Amino acid sequence: MLPPVETDEEWDAVVPDEKLMRPGVRDLCARLGLSGLPLTRFPDGSQPVYAVGDEHVLKLFPGAAARDGEAEGRVLSHVQGRLPVPTPQVRDAGPYENGWRYVLMARLCGENLAGAWDRVPPADRERIVGEIGEALAVLHTLDPGPLGDFLGPGDWGAFVDRQRAGAVEQQRGHGLSAEWLEQIPEFLASVPLPRAPQPSLLHTEVMRQHFLVDPDGWRLTGLFDFEPAMVGDRAYDFVGVGLFVTRGDPRLLTRLAKVYRTTFDPAELLAYTLLHVYSNLPWYLRELGASPERTPPSLAEAWFGIA
């Protein structure tokens, strides 16, 4: 009952439209034995995600993103019960129709950390980022071998080369000014990145938006959204950490790194910021602000330096 979605135009026409989505979602719920439960769509996220009653979350992936749906199910099953923070338990996953895939998950408890952050006392913020550092440390020690046949990019050095070759055009497409664009090639050429790092399972979007927290005691209660997971250099995961968790606060990043037990060169992290699959430097500059010197090395220190 869900229409095919294989192009950007079909995505824009179908995925946001609840009149088109909801009948198919109800049909799928019925097939999964969940008829009659309240269905509430979450407002955020790139994929359509629904709370089904109080205990289930149903995430759908159109044909254009079907591989992401398979990745979500496989990675969640791989990490289940192995991290110090809860992750959604997969209850069912598979193909639906017209190329769509789904993952039915147990619903985690808690409030989204991004929405709660302003209410978190300073001492609890430090403890929370420490918990995030602990979760990342464990994630990065898990054997990614069982996922290596599916998760990319495979050859990390080739991935870095491809991203470097397209870095300027990617940022130009987002509207980055010439002042910054002209500095990117020289900066990337100056930062040595490993071509064959120890393979680590990467979340790739470590953001406050992907953590849940219990306001009663301010403890992490969940980590979710593993669809863009990769296998590669663990430093790549610290792009999201610096931009979306510690957000240029050296004290918080120092706390997280202390628990993680490794620090990374700020220049390396800014290089990975520019090479990230979803890199959008103009957005980051609007969110975090530019360094006074307006150079990549100074920006690296401002966003990824530690106290």
Image: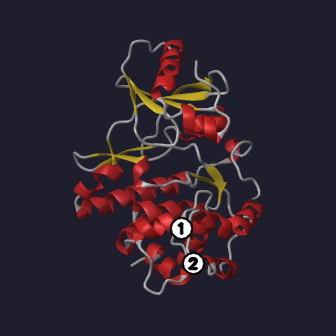
Indicate whether 213 appears above or below 239.
above
The picture places residue 87, in percent across and down from the top left corner, at 46, 40
Percent coordinates x, y for residue 29 in the rendering:
49, 17
Tag 1 residue: 281
Viewed as shown, does residue 169 lie left or right of 123? right
Q: Residue at x 61, y 76 (%)?
A: 181
> Which kind of residue does numbered mark 2 sit on?
Trp
Q: Is 225 situated above or below 255? A: above
Under circle 2, the secondary element is helix
Q: Is residue 282 above or below residue 48?
A: below
The reply to whether residue 178 is in sight is yes
Q: Distance between the residues labelled 1 and 2?
A: 9 Å
Using the image, tell me which numbered label, if any, was put on residue 180.
2
Q: In which quarter of the image is the C terminus?
A: bottom left
The residue type indicated by label 1 comes to: Leu
Q: Assess whether mark 2 and mark 1 are in contact (beta carbons under 8 angstroms).
A: yes
Colouring scheme applied when the structure was drawn: secondary structure
Q: Residue at x 42, y 56 (%)?
A: 132
In which quadrant is the N terminus drawn?
Answer: top right
Measured from the top left, where is residue 84 in percent x and y? 43, 47
Image-quadrant location for residue 167: bottom right
Is residue 258 something that shows in the picture?
A: no
